[in-house]
Amino acid sequence: MHGLRVAFGARTVVHDVDLTFAAGTLTAIVGPNACGKSTLLRAMARILRPTRGAVILQGADVASLSTKEVARRLGLLPQAPTAPGGVTVADLVRRGRFPHQGRFRQWSEQDEHAVQTALEHTGLGGLERRLLDELSGGQRQRAWLAMALAQEADILLLDEPTTFLDLPHQHEVLDVLEDLRRARGTTIVAVLHDLNQAGAYAQQVVAMRDGSVVAQGTPHEILTEAVIADVYGMAVRVVPNPVDGTPLIVPIRKGGPRWPVNKTSRQNL
């Protein structure tokens, strides 16, 4: 995207953003609430029209493409999506195949295979006939993700894809995205709140504040004590993750530890 600006009336929400996403990589967009992350994602998906600049999708201005062509190339999982009542998991996931249907191309074995693969990858096998309203928040989120995976687009835009998920399922979803990126070469752009997840899974991190990109680069370049203090206004320590060496962010409590960590206190626990 080049010089992208998005405004609501007189209020500019995204300021002149220039970003490039390399094919086959996962980019995490991070930053405090209301800094423009979701607005940027929606502009990339052509849900919002920029007031200046352009989004270039595989060499073409996204504004020049038909809705169906955009959907074949790009999948979007918005924040807190909703569906009408009475929709089953299978119904929802099958909607991901809509961009591939047409007057002379109806439902095929390829479509069914894409749906079943998406259900398996998101751990929803066996729940196809369950109503979406009957699922837990985490299961619903995985059903929406399955719909995006069934779309088989080259690019996925995900707005907080781990929302409502417990810790194991958060990492299962992120592992699915990593497998997708490696196996299919899918380009993934995800808004993430957890900086440690961004450091562990992303190849590029984009940090935003007040509608502007303040830093972009690899996790080791961006997830530093100085950048986090600048973006979030909080003190942290960044240490290597003992498992894989990725940046591990440890917040510093105001006033220090709640109790002294020593031999006596450990014995009393």
Image: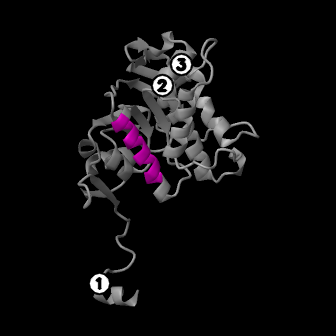
Residue at the far right in the pictured view:
86
Disc 2 crowd, CA 10 A, few/some/many (<14, 14-19, 20+)? many
Which residue in the protein does label 3 denote? 49
Per the image, is 173 magenta? yes
Picture residue at 64% right of the left edge, 49% below the top: 127
Range shown magenta: 170-183
User: Tag 2, which secondary structure?
Assistant: strand
Residue closer to the observer: 186 or 163: 186
Q: Secondary structure at mark 1?
A: loop
The residue that mark 2 highlights is 74
Disc 3 crowd rating (10 Å Cα; few below 14, some 14-19, many 20+) is: some
Q: Which is in the foreground here, disc 3 or disc 2?
A: 2
User: How many neighbours does mark 1 have within 10 angstroms: few (below 14), some (14-19), or many (20 or more)?
Assistant: few
At label 1, which amino acid type do we have? Asn
Question: Looking at numbered disc 2 in the image, what kind of residue is underneath it?
Answer: Leu
Question: Which badge, 1 or 2, comes first in the chain's sequence?
Answer: 2
> At 71% from the left edge and 45% from the top edge, which residue is drawn?
131
Residue ID at (60%, 24%): 98
Quarter of the C terminus within the rendering: bottom left
Which residue has dot 1 on it?
Answer: 262
Instruction: Say if residue 74 shows up in the picture.
Output: yes
* Magenta segment includes 18: no
94 or 47: nearer the viewer: 94
Quadrant position of residue 186? top left
Quarter in which the N terminus is drawn: top left
Display colour scheme: one colour
Residue 246 position in % (x across, y down): 26, 52
Q: The disc labelled 3 sits on which kind of residue?
A: Arg
Decide which of tag 3 and tag 1 comes sooner along the chain: 3
